[in-house]
Image (cartoon, rainbow, N blue to C red):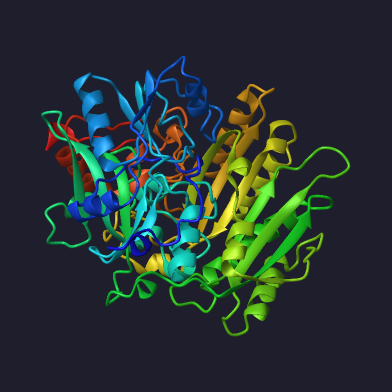
Amino acid sequence: MSEVTRRGFMGGSAALGGGVAAGLLPAAPALAAAQAEGPPPLGPVVVRPGDPRYEDLVVRRTNQRFRPEPEYFHVVGSTDQVVKAVGDAVRAGRRVTVRSGGHCYENFVGDGAQVVIDMCEMSEVYFDEERGAFAIEAGATLMQTYRKLYLGWGVTIPGGQCGGVAAGGHIAGGGYGPLSRRDGLTVDYLHAVEVVVVDRAGRARAVVATRDPADPNHDLWWAHTGGGGGNFGVVTRYWMRDPAARGDDPAKLLPRPPATVLSGLAIWSWDGMTRESFGRLLRNHGEWHERHSGPGSPHASLWGSLLIPGRQEGADPGGMILPTQIDASVPGAEKLLTDYFAAVGEGVTPQAIVPPLQRDPWFYAARTLSLGEDAESGRYKGKSAYLRSRFTDEQAGIAFDHLTAGGAAAGGMLWLLSYGGRVNSVAPTATATVERRSILKVIHLATWDETQDGTAHLEWVRGFHSRTFAGTGGVPVPGGNCGGAYINYPDIDHADPAWNTSGVPWSTIYYADNYPRLQRVKARWDPRNVFRHALSIRPPAGGS
């Protein structure tokens, strides 16, 4: 295998941004041999307190609420190094956690960790001829991945718009983004995964698990199609390939993104926005998605992200923003987009400001519309839900009341992201991502700066989420217009009876009927419960 074929277009150095890694993968023999052709990997590097690099690794996180301070960070550059790092920590009786990009809503990396395995230097993306699939190491950020796949082979994966998130946690939790209505979830293209696991005797080893149902490790593959990170082992590498693809031409093995993206923006001011008009906006937006989110819809490539920040005090109260994009090659794309803005804004006052539409090459649009690492950094608390149908009028009224309450509301946000389409063409049991009926994703978010202790902001976002789902015990229990919550936006309040009064366990909110199977996978592959956090998969009662 030549270095050019194996590496493709590398395009830049490893970034320090990324997603929380819940797992990591080991290399197959063919890959290990291929890696020997290139330069030796960085590491292993052990960084302890007192080393000037320690503080840099402490602050390599996006949620500044949490500060990991382990006995040491272990920066790794190969699967063999991960195996040794995990094995050494387990033999010494130290608590191990993993970080790929550092994007986590909760303190899963730092909480009680004595050893943090940092994957930032395992960031290669290349085509693996032996497996006939694209390999993505756990520390590769989404923007690195998009760039290398697209410039090298003209393909992509339907991943998130937060370019600094890393593959390690993003893929394990399901993965979605602007192309998901058209192409499905990221995990719908998962061909194989490499994971460093620990057996009952405490021995660490690398395992490759594939999509093939005849693979004896198939259950471990399935668990990484939405089971979330930090549950079964350390993911070191993913292989991606369209399950419907045939042949060995890399340019035909993953989706090709739109050649050109048509994007636009609608903006509504808080100034003059009444409770009734706000409710009309949310009703219009939700009903449009109810009508146009079926698999195969001509609107499938249209994706919008309705951001509603809390009303600001002062002369400029701010407003609601609806950035939207569509594949420019779709027949009548411009009319589809302008009709969408008109439908969402029908009867809403004040009227929306809609600047001229813009056409851009896909990768340029992906870069410019992406949320960069700096934009995601700060102190925040997030909560999520899937919506199978629009918010009720009562829920919309609750949103208006919370977003216009002043004080901590000024640092808060309601975020509604387009969903459905091809995502919902997959059976709930085919992957660990059980929710395949929703049309929107919801994020309730509170942010604050370092001069604030965050107490009022936490109270605000918890109250907002709890009141929104008051009819089901303050949490998004699957059923009715709700489809549970997204494990890549974890919220430990869902496991707290003070906030979850539904009587429904957190595991049902995130995994529904897929949870017992995930528990069986946990029992088989992590029998010592080495990899755990506040919302990790629990072994089944009796351990079987």
Foreground pick, 176 / 19: 19
Q: Quadrant of the N terminus?
A: bottom left
**Residue 412 seen:** yes
Q: Residue at coordinates 18% horizontally, 40% vertically from top-left?
A: 525
Foreground pick, 200 / 340: 200
Residue 387 as seen in the image, left or right of residue 528: right
Q: Residue at coordinates 11% horizontally, 54% vertically from top-left?
A: 216
Q: Quadrant of the C terminus?
A: top left
**x, y percent for residue 426:** 33, 66
**x, y percent for residue 355:** 78, 66
- Which residue is situated farthest in the right direction here? 315
**Residue 391 seen:** no
Q: Residue at coordinates 21% horizontally, 40% vertically from top-left?
A: 522
* 317 to 322, vertically: above or below: above
* 17 to 441, vertically: above or below: above
Q: Quadrant of residue 430?
A: bottom left
Residue 462 as seen in the image, left or right of residue 156: right
Residue 210 as seen in the image, left or right of residue 479: left
Foreground pick, 279 / 194: 194
**x, y percent for residue 228:** 35, 44
Foreground pick, 353 / 136: 136
**x, y percent for residue 502:** 41, 38
